[in-house]
Amino acid sequence: MTKHIDFNDAVAYSLKAGILLSAALVLFGAFLVFYYNGASGLSLSQLSASNSQVNTHTYSISEIFSGIANLNGISFILLGLIVLITTPVFRVLISVLAFLREGNRLFFAITLIVLIDLLVAIFIVPHFVAG
């Protein structure tokens, strides 16, 4: 007998996993920053300054992953923030798939519009705002 996971349980598990993973990455990154007294060639005082050079626009995805390989604390923190941002997007994706499987066309369409809106806001809008 196969056990089916309830939709609400799947959503709850995905949200909990995303939050816990995000928190673990951010905490580990903060530990590394304090342990090495800085990161990315910057001292702790430079990182914490109000005019710090470090922000999400200064790191690309490839730089974050190469920083992970080098145990760069800032890269772990940024990856934790990416996981935190993608957690609710993943929740909406689960909802889209669940409504599709149930054959509920109205909620499938509404949730698909929400998913598209989220993806546009994350990937397209920043190019217009930053530029």
Image (tube, grey):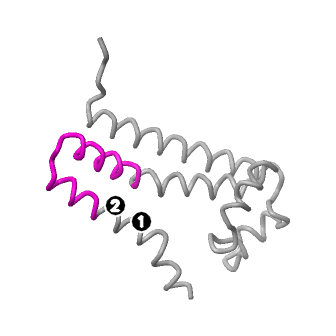
Q: Which residue of the protein is positioned furthest toward the top in this rendering?
A: 1
Mark 2 and mark 1 residues within 8 Å of each other at the beta carbon = yes
Disc assigned to residue 115: 2
Measuring from the top left, give residue 122's x and y in whole percent. 46, 68
Measuring from the top left, give residue 51's x and y in whole percent. 69, 80
Question: Which of the 4 image quadrants contains residue 97?
Answer: top left
Residue at point 70%, 58% (across, down): 64
Q: In which quarter of the image is the N terminus?
A: top left
Disc assigned to residue 119: 1
Q: Is residue 106 above or below residue 60?
A: above
Measuring from the top left, give residue 128's x and y in whole percent. 49, 85
Residue at point 69%, 73% (across, down): 58
Dominant SS type (magenta): helix
Element class at badge 1 = helix
Measuring from the top left, give residue 61's x and y in whole percent. 66, 62
Q: Is residue 27 left or right of residue 71?
A: left
**Which amino acid does the dot numbered 1 rest on?**
Leu
Query: Which residue range is magenta in the image?
Result: 89-113
Q: In this view, does 107 lie to the left or right of 43?
A: left
Q: In this view, does 52 lie above or below 7?
A: below
